[in-house]
Amino acid sequence: MSATNFDIIIVGGGPGGYVAALRAAQLGLSAAVVEAKHLGGICLNWGCIPTKALLRASEINHLLHDLGPYGFSAEKVSFDFSKIVARSRAVSKQLSGGVAHLLKKAKVPVFEGYGKLDGVDGAKRKVLVTPEKGAAVTLTAKHVILATGARARTLPGLEPDGKLVWSYREALVPEALPRRLLVIGSGAIGSEFASFYRNMGSEVTLVEVAPRILPVEDEEISALARKAFEKQGIRVLTSAKIGALRKSASDVTVPVEVNGKTEEFTVDRVISAVGIVGNVENIGLEGTKVKTDRTHVVTDALCRTGEPGVYAIGDLAGAPWLAHKASHEAVMCVEAIAGKHVHPIDSTKIPGCTYCRPQIASVGYTEARAKEAGYKVRVGKFPLMANGKALAMGEPEGLVKTVFDAQTGELLGAHMIGAEVTEMIQGYVIARTGELTEAELAETIFPHPTISESMHEAVLAAYDGALHF
């Protein structure tokens, strides 16, 4: 690792940073990654991947306790919670090692330490890398991509203490299953943890300050999610205000006000899932033309900041805070640096997925947003209870909803709740990206029997042509 001069330096080795380095190497550009902790970033180590491993375990636990409808019975069903957590960590470790292998294979050096902009050297930018141990090193490159990600937002009085009040990190590696749990925030993170812990047997209360849970989703989908959660035994409180927490040695009491009435909940643990903030501190933005807005770096459509030669991608560059958005931005940014023609990202073509039970997936405009934007819409809906594969699986709970431009037939948005919808949403994403209309979608042949047939029916339903409902 004797070289210190590169075409591109990427600060951060998450799903944005390491993908940027790999694409740069493919294009013949020399690249280096600066990473202080773990390759793969929050997503791979403390987010997307380990949560999915935990959720898979909780789905198995749920099935083992609900075998009757399938004709099975089981006695003395039990689990080793420490092994469930250990498996989740092992999956993350394996994938982090995989990222290291890919970078090594691409001949991309990884500098361990904290990176920050450190002025210029002629036409090149300097990045100071400070490891936890050892001497600092200065790297130079014409282009620097900042991909430092984000961290959990903390609110006064809700600061994680590592014991009674958890962030996502503590919630991923609990020493034991809490009997009583209160989750504050019903976005993707909060809803997934609520689902996991409820499926494992915890008493769960989900609290949201907004009028509905999963507030970024279509209203109809949010309502169905709430109904499903409550059916599972999760208590849901919306339009709620949290009072001052009172902690004892082993539990915490949380006052929650709804509609002017306050109820106190004494629980073993509280999970705070109230959003994220960008890691803009200590990366050398001072004295540069890089602008920040509410802890996120401001960029143009091609990820360029106000400082020449400095770019920002992923969570650092703001919403939507999704790993696949970061990876796509990484490729786009590097290709633009390499002089290739690229298309700026359209946020309405980025899918969002929540892996609770039932799963939720969406892309594009909600019905309300489409109307607010001035569109006249045609809406199609198809319930999974009318889908043969969903019934055969014993998963009839759910809905597929489509929103079309009534004038042009363009698919404006699609919203799904039900089994495996996170695996199916990409069909609608392709339709959005390819600017398909209801005509092409209606003429598409879907395989039978699959849950994806409900996607076809939801298209037909928007034009009064649903066949099976």
Image (cartoon, rainbow, N blue to C red):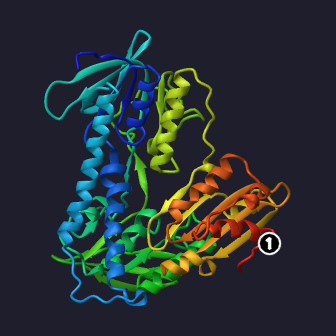
- Which residue is located at x 55 percent, y 63 percent? 361
Amino acid type of the residue that numbered disc 1 sits on in the rendered structure: Gly
- Which residue is located at x 29 percent, y 24 percent? 128
- Relative to 92, does residue 461 appear above or below in the rendering? below
- Which residue is located at x 44 percent, y 11 percent? 123
Residue at far right of view: 407
- Relative to 127, does residue 178 appear above or below in the rendering? below
Question: In the rendered image, which quarter is residue 389 located in?
Answer: bottom right
Check the picture and name the quadrant holding the N terminus: top left
Residue at far top of view: 122
- For the residue pair 459 and 137, the one nearer the viewer reads as 459
- Counting from the top left corner in percent of width and height, residue 390 is at 54, 76
Label 1 residue SS: loop
Question: In the rendered image, which quarter is residue 100 located in?
Answer: top left
Q: Which residue is mark 1?
A: 465
Check the picture and name the quadrant holding the C terminus: bottom right
Q: Is residue 148 at all visible to an observer of this figure? A: yes
- Counting from the top left corner in percent of width and height, residue 342 is at 61, 30
Q: Taking 299 as reference, is 99 left or right?
A: left
- For the residue pair 74 and 8, the one nearer the viewer reads as 74
- Counting from the top left corner in percent of width and height, residue 347 is at 61, 48
- Relative to 352, does residue 129 appear above or below in the rendering? above
Q: Residues within 10 Å of mark 1 (few under 14, many from 20)?
A: some
